[in-house]
């Protein structure tokens, strides 16, 4: 049986959906380039919508940031699903990591403890975590990923590479990032058997930061 077709949005509903996505993309750019103290007016200006449109959708700046967190976790889930669709477990894992780095997953980490965690945020995080766990478990079963590397290790690695990478003259930031990421990915392969320092990071420890 084929999957049901989602009704196509038309008119005001479609316009509202486009405006909302524009706001989220604008918020991601503004807050990650100007800092989280940037005014929401800068978000509205970049999105090409009026302040009234922004406040009708998000009554406070915190609501906008909460939605931005949900959007990020939804992107992580989509990247994990794409990774699981790859027949090759290693290619699926590297695709997931590269996609998460590309959209900047991890740059919202400074918000931990600064905004309230909503049920929607928790649900989106649990779904993303479950899919990522499945992706890492598959790579372990296939014998292509170091057995001592956990999902949390991968998440923190992605977070590190989501940050700005200083580039020397003549080389672009993305070129440097891609090179360093390729080196890191090679270090994740199962043939690297050297002992890693310390134990795997605790998921609970990092989740607790958001509840502070």
Image: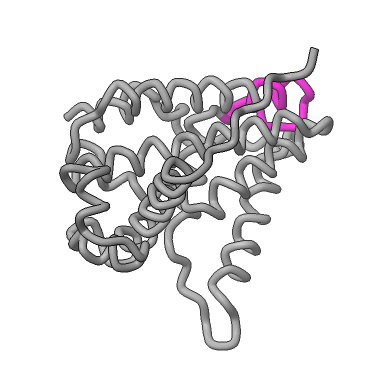
Q: What residue is drawn where x is 51% and y is 52%? A: 103
Instruction: Work out whether residue 76 or residue 26 is closer to the camera in this orientation and state it.
Output: 26
Instruction: Work out whether residue 149 or residue 181 is closer to the camera in this orientation and state it.
Output: 181
Q: What residue is drawn where x is 49% and y is 35%? A: 74
- The answer to which quarter of the image holds residue 49 is bottom left
170 is higher (above) or lower (below) than 20? below
Q: Which quadrant is home to the C terminus? A: top left
Whole-percent x and y of residue 76?
53, 37
Part of the protein shown in magenta:
136-149
Q: Residue furthest bottom?
A: 169
As for residue 157 lying within the magenta part, the answer is no
- The answer to which quarter of the image holds residue 93 is top right
Does 24 sit left or right of 41 as displayed?
Answer: right
137 is higher (above) or lower (below) than 153? above
Whole-percent x and y of residue 126?
44, 21
Does 176 sit left or right of 37 as displayed?
Answer: right
Does 1 sit left or right of 97 as displayed?
Answer: right
Whole-percent x and y of residue 185?
66, 47
Instruction: Work out whether residue 203 or residue 43 is closer to the camera in this orientation and state it.
Output: 43
Q: Which quadrant is home to the N terminus? A: top right
Q: What residue is drawn where x is 44% and y is 44%? A: 17
| Total count of labels | 0
Whole-percent x and y of residue 29?
38, 61
């Amino acid at each position: 049986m084929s999957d049901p077709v989602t009704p196509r949005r038309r008119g005001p509903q479609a316009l509202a959906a486009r405006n909302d996505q524009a706001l989220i993309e604008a918020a991601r750019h503004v807050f990650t380039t100007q800092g989280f103290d940037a005014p929401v007016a800068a978000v509205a200006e970049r999105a090409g919508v009026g302040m009234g449109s922004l406040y009708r959708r998000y009554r406070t700046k915190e609501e906008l940031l909460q939605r931005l967190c949900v959007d990020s976790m939804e992107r992580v889930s989509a990247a994990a699903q794409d990774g699981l669709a790859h027949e090759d477990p290693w290619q699926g894992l590297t695709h997931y990591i590269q996609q998460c780095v590309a959209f900047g997953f991890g740059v919202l980490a400074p918000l931990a403890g600064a905004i309230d965690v909503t049920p929607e945020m928790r649900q989106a995080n649990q779904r993303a975590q479950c899919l990522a766990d499945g992706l890492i478990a598959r790579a372990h079963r296939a014998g292509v990923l170091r057995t001592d590397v956990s999902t949390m290790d991968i998440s923190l690695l992605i977070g590190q590479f989501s940050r700005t990478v200083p580039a020397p003259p003549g080389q672009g930031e993305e070129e440097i990032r891609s090179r360093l990421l390729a080196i890191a990915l090679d270090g994740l392969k199962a043939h690297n058997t050297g002992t890693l320092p310390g134990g795997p990071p605790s998921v609970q420890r990092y989740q607790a930061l958001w509840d502070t």
